[in-house]
């Protein structure tokens, strides 16, 4: 068996609010630095991006796995947005879609092109229901896999408070049999999802939904597969048969929608506090944005801490560049932070190796004790947080000091120091 670390939900530079420097080269280089073995292409239905994919990627022996000349392996993936009305309520749902080969990807693109434009955004919006979409995809190929993305996000998650559903069955109805997994999203982790018995026969997967190739975004969440051979078929069978090996998870408290609140008013409250104030903002008197933790409490039919017999292991993790930034007091995208980051990558190979495997003694030979301490705290899951809410990232608290999240617009961030990049 071979371990494969996969991040199958990303975007291209053709998607809105994404880095304009995203390319097969940058994705390949940074995913290797991160420690990823398999990356989703994202946005395969976009007419310009698919041209690049067909030019830059070569399929490996009809496996549905493609390789770039930079050494990274890819699988054809995309995310589609659906805005429609069902049950007299407006719905906004994002579905991640995996395609087995270029022929099927082209058929998906052709079918979607008959229902709307594909050239304006890497994540296009359609007015059809999730039921219609699944029916359309299954008519093309039963090998297509459809996964509700960031399942709990208030605005675009299948269980989201603003426009979601209370169950997979409510959303997909008779097509629910074709849904085999949900993506946790950065504001929830598997333990939160285990509290819903309706998900007992559903695989829990995690991917980054990255809008850039920066180390603190790319593969901040990933899914690990144990495979005899890397192929699209084996990946899909692992998902459909609940044979996921493990997931790497963002700490849900650091996610942008973990707690309830109002960004404009600076109000953040726990689910219990939110219920006490009847979900109304004490400042502006408007309804609060109900976050993931609250929504899980609403739908859970099991107590906190419940663990199913078939539960797969997971590890919460803060990206290495954020830990370095917190330790040295320099911005996450600063030259100083990246110099230390690249120094560690050069010594230890990749970020996941550093975060999970390298011993303290070896770390201390390369970086100072404070950076080492934060890596170990992260590894031991001993991190406290000021929770995220209403689109605001949460932030860790180290030694009683709150480490504020980076204020970065992915599409406007300056180029990373590239001096060491070509070594990988």
Image (spheres, rainbow, N blue to C red):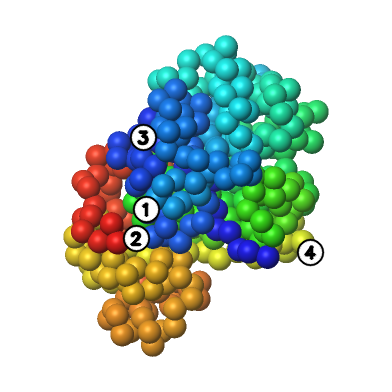
Q: Residues within 10 Å of mark 3 (few under 14, many from 20)?
A: many
Residue 280's spot in the image, x, y percent?
Answer: 48, 39
- Relative vertical location of residue 64 with respect to residue 417 in this rendering, above or below: above
- Residue 308 figure quarter: bottom right
Residue 220's spot in the image, x, y percent?
Answer: 45, 55
Q: Can residue 125 be seen in this view?
A: yes
Circles 3 and 1: CB atoms closer than 8 Å: no
Residue that appears at 46% across and 51% down:
72
* Disc 4 secondary structure class: loop
Lower sequence index among marks 2 and 1: 1
Q: Residue furthest bottom?
A: 361
- Would residue 167 be found to the left or right of residue 21 on screen? right
* Disc 2 secondary structure class: loop
Residue 283's spot in the image, x, y percent?
Answer: 37, 40
Between 195 and 276, the residue placed more toward the observer is: 195
Residues under labels 2 and 1: Cα distance?
7 Å
**Residue 29, disc:** 1
Between 17 and 345, the residue placed more toward the observer is: 345
Residue at the spot of label 2: 424
- Relative vertical location of residue 114 with respect to residue 145 in this rendering, above or below: above
Rendered-image quadrant of the C terminus: bottom left
Residue at the spot of label 4: 309
Q: Which of marks 4 and 1 is in front?
A: 1
Lower sequence index among marks 3 and 2: 3
Q: Which residue lies furthest to the top in this view?
A: 114
Residue at the spot of label 3: 13
Residues under labels 3 and 2: Cα distance?
22 Å
């Amino acid at each position: 068996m071979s371990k494969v670390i996969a991040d199958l939900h990303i975007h291209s530079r053709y998607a809105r609010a994404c880095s304009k420097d995203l390319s097969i080269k940058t994705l390949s280089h940074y995913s290797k630095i991160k420690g990823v073995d398999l990356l989703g292409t994202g946005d395969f239905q976009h007419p310009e991006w698919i041209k690049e994919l067909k030019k830059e990627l070569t399929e490996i022996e009809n496996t549905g796995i493609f390789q770039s000349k930079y050494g990274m392996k890819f699988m054809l993936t995309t995310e589609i947005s659906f805005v429609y009305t069902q049950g007299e309520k407006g719905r906004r749902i994002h579905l991640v879609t995996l395609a087995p080969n270029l022929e099927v990807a082209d058929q998906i693109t052709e079918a979607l092109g008959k229902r709307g434009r594909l050239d304006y955004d890497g994540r296009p919006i359609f007015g059809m229901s999730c039921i219609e979409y699944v029916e359309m995809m299954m008519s093309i190929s039963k090998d297509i896999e459809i996964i509700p993305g960031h399942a709990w996000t208030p605005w675009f998650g299948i269980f989201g408070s603003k426009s979601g559903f209370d169950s997979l069955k409510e959303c997909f109805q008779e097509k629910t049999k074709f849904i085999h997994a949900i993506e946790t999203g950065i504001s929830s982790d598997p333990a939160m999802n285990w509290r819903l018995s309706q998900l007992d026969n559903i695989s829990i997967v995690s991917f980054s939904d990255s809008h850039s190739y920066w180390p603190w975004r790319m593969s901040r969440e990933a899914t690990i597969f144990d495979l005899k051979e890397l192929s699209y078929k084996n990946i899909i069978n692992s998902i459909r048969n609940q044979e996921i090996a493990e997931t790497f998870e963002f700490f849900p408290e650091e996610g942008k929608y973990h707690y309830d609140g109002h960004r404009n008013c600076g109000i953040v409250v726990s689910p219990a506090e939110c219920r006490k104030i009847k979900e109304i903002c004490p400042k502006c008197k408007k309804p609060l944005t109900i976050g993931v933790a609250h929504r899980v409490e609403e739908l859970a039919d099991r107590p906190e801490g419940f663990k199913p017999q078939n539960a797969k292991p997971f590890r919460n993790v803060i990206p290495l560049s954020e830990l370095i930034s917190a330790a040295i007091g320099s911005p996450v995208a600063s030259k100083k932070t990246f110099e230390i980051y690249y120094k560690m990558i050069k010594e230890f190979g990749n970020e996941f190796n550093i975060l999970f495997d390298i011993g303290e003694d070896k770390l201390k030979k390369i970086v100072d004790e404070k950076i080492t301490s934060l890596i170990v705290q992260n590894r031991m899951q001993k991190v406290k947080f000021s929770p995220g809410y209403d689109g605001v990232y949460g932030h860790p608290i180290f030694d009683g000091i709150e480490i504020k999240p980076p204020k970065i617009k992915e599409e406007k961030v300056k180029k990373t120091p590239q001096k060491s990049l070509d070594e990988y």
